[in-house]
Image (spheres, rainbow, N blue to C red):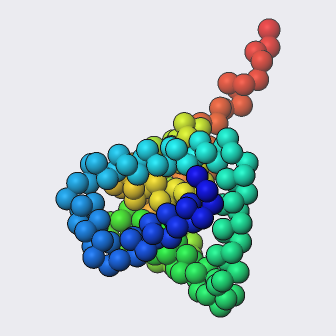
Amino acid sequence: MPRTLEVNRVARREEYHANPAVRQQQRQWQLNNPIAYKAIQERSRIKNRLRRQIDPAYKAHLADMRRQWRAKRPPKLRLSQREYRRRWREKLREDVLRHYGQEHLACIICGFADHRALTIDHINDNGAEERKAGRYTTGHFYEWLRSSDFPSGYQTLCGNCQFIKEWERKQKNRLAPDEFLPKRQ
């Protein structure tokens, strides 16, 4: 296909999709057909992922588009986006802590309420097994909890109570001196 025809086709497609009536019609179809829409999204996601892996020119094209996008945005906007993400993470953390703190933003043992020292504790002490199983990565723990519909087995503790709980667990599992020393004959 000659280059001018390709450019005209792309321009016509962009003009068509920029039409508000068309966009409204597409949005209505998406809302009326959620399963089909999800299937289309998943096919596109897989196709594009494979294309990024196989085609180095496409990968370079995407990097160039990201550079152009960042160049168009002033640093102030990028700062505000960073601030938005920071606030979003703080709100997510607060929501999760509040849910597992029995609707209070406080430790369920001692009532300490400074959000900076509150943590999520695995009630059954199985955090290491969960991380090894690959349920979530460290930075996405709160997201995983919310997207999994707040599974049971977690609680909100302050740093002190969680440290004391861990210390007591280790003391309980520690062997008495006569149990690990060899028997004398």
Relative image position of residue 44 (x, y in whole percent): 46, 49
Q: Looking at the image, which residue is at 27% across and 60% down?
A: 30
Left or right, 156 with respect to 71, comes to left
One can see residue 142 in this view: yes
> In the figure, residue 24 lies in which quadrant?
bottom left
* Viewer-side residue, 160 vs 155: 155
Residue found farthest to the left: 32
170, above or below 29, in the image? above
> In the figure, residue 173 lies in which quadrant?
top right
* Viewer-side residue, 61 vs 140: 61
174, above or below 183, in the image? below
Q: Looking at the image, which residue is at 66% across and 32% down?
A: 176
Q: Looking at the image, which residue is at 49% across and 49% down?
A: 45
* Viewer-side residue, 179 vs 97: 97
Count of residue discs: 0
Q: Looking at the image, which residue is at 52% across and 44% down?
A: 47
One can see residue 129 in this view: no
Relative image position of residue 142 (x, y in whole percent): 48, 60
> In the figure, residue 19 lies in which quadrant?
bottom left
Residue found farthest to the top: 185
181, above or below 83, in the image? above
Relative image position of residue 84 (x, y in whole percent): 53, 81
Say which quadrant the C terminus sits in: top right
